[in-house]
Amino acid sequence: MSLRNRELVFLIPALVVTTLGFALVYTQKSAELTLTSLTYGALFLALFVIAHLGVRLLASRADCYLLPITALLSTMGLVVLYRLNEDLALKQAMWLVAGLAVFLLVLAFVRNLNMLYKYRYVIGGLGLLLLLLTAVLGREVHGARLWVNLGPIGFQPGELAKVFLMVFFAAYLVDMREVLTVSTRRVLGVPLPPFRYLAPLLIIWGLSLALMIFVKDLGASLLFFGALLALLYVATGRFFYVLVGLALFAIGAIALYFLFPHVQLRVDIWLDPWADPSNRGYQIVQSLFALAEGGLFGRGLGGGYLFLPSGRTIIPHLETDFVFSAIGEELGLVGAVGIILLYLIFTYRGFRVAVSTKDDFSRLLATGLTSIFALQAFLIIGGVIKLIPLTGITLPFVSYGGSSILANFILLALLLRASAKAREV
């Protein structure tokens, strides 16, 4: 079976999940099953079939698993959002259409990844501009300054900035990888390259800490810095950079813990949410209860105890920060592990793309994009299950958020372009 035919076959599970999911939720809400509820699966399958046809036309040799995994995650997110808030589900569906349109546009115009390398400084400048825009004009929501309003539309510039900066980091390391592996002096017996080549690492370290200070976004800080360390290791093969980077980030994070109350609050809630379960620790405590209530197979879509008598969700911001908790309660451990496995397979395929590419820029770009995707999924799931402090970022393709949908579809398009290029060489 050809790559594209295999991709088309693997889109069928997304049809099944969406159709059954909408049917179950609709039945729970109205006690009857209508033809309308059964057509949702076909509608969203049609959208991804259009995307599939675009890939078949524009990147015929691309990886055949990444798009079906994205379809499963996206449609599962829509089903859960429909269960929680029908209005948000409609908005998410519109963003999904916009994301697929952007996905096809990127595939159509970025026919060769070398054009991104050529304009690396412009792309890097745009990424920094978006972060600066967030810091200066951002509107604080739920303790983090992430949103910028353009008239009636609000968006998160940091979501697009992460993709732009990954392109720049990959291109920069292609230019500097040789000098970063050459040692000119030793400090405490450790070989180091010239300081001017270490400066970008220190600048990004400072930028990560600045994000924690001004934007109050711990998640974005960990995301940018973690992805950069992964790129440095792949580019140079020296684990020393990872150790130094982790040490720098730990020193900065400890300093910020004692200097800024919002960082201290996040860590304190993580360490002991039961100290104040009805106020500061309320979200994470309710999340743990929801996950425990789901058991092995869950209470079924529409059967979980997710709403208060007033109609509000029992966990605040359930549609964005804690959507994984809703999945865990209604689909149980089996459903939650299934979602995690989808992210793991996506990550595996992304790194496989990186390994299979022949040129350095494509390899580093695929590594950076896959790393930032995997880290984002890990950070939000880890926060929801109390493995790490809660960061408040979105779960890729599942949580509600238009900016996240657009950014992740751009990421997907670039990964498919890299995989197609690898097979064409």
Image (cartoon, rainbow, N blue to C red):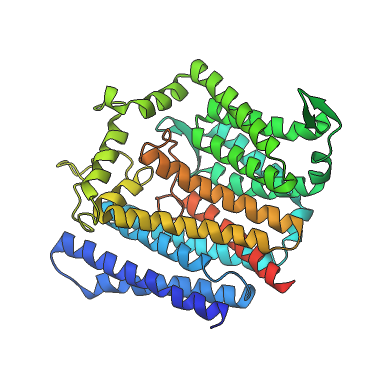
Against 188, residue 56 (above or below) is below
* Residue 278: image location, x then y, percent: 24, 27
Total of numbered circles in the picture? 0
Residue lying at the far bottom of the rendered structure: 1
User: Which of 21/142 is in front?
Assistant: 21
User: Which of 332/395 is in front?
Assistant: 332
Against 70, residue 3 (above or below) is below
What residue is rendered at 39% in x and 69% in y?
Answer: 14
Residue lying at the far right of the rendered structure: 184
Image quarter hosting the C terminus: bottom right
* Residue 311: image location, x then y, percent: 19, 44
What residue is rendered at 33% in x and 72% in y?
Answer: 16
What residue is rendered at 61% in x and 65% in y?
Answer: 416
Q: Does residue 163 appear in the picture of this structure? A: yes
* Residue 129: image location, x then y, percent: 65, 39
Q: Specify whether 375 is left or right of 385.
A: right
User: Which of 360/206 is in front?
Assistant: 360
User: Which of 301/371 is in front?
Assistant: 371
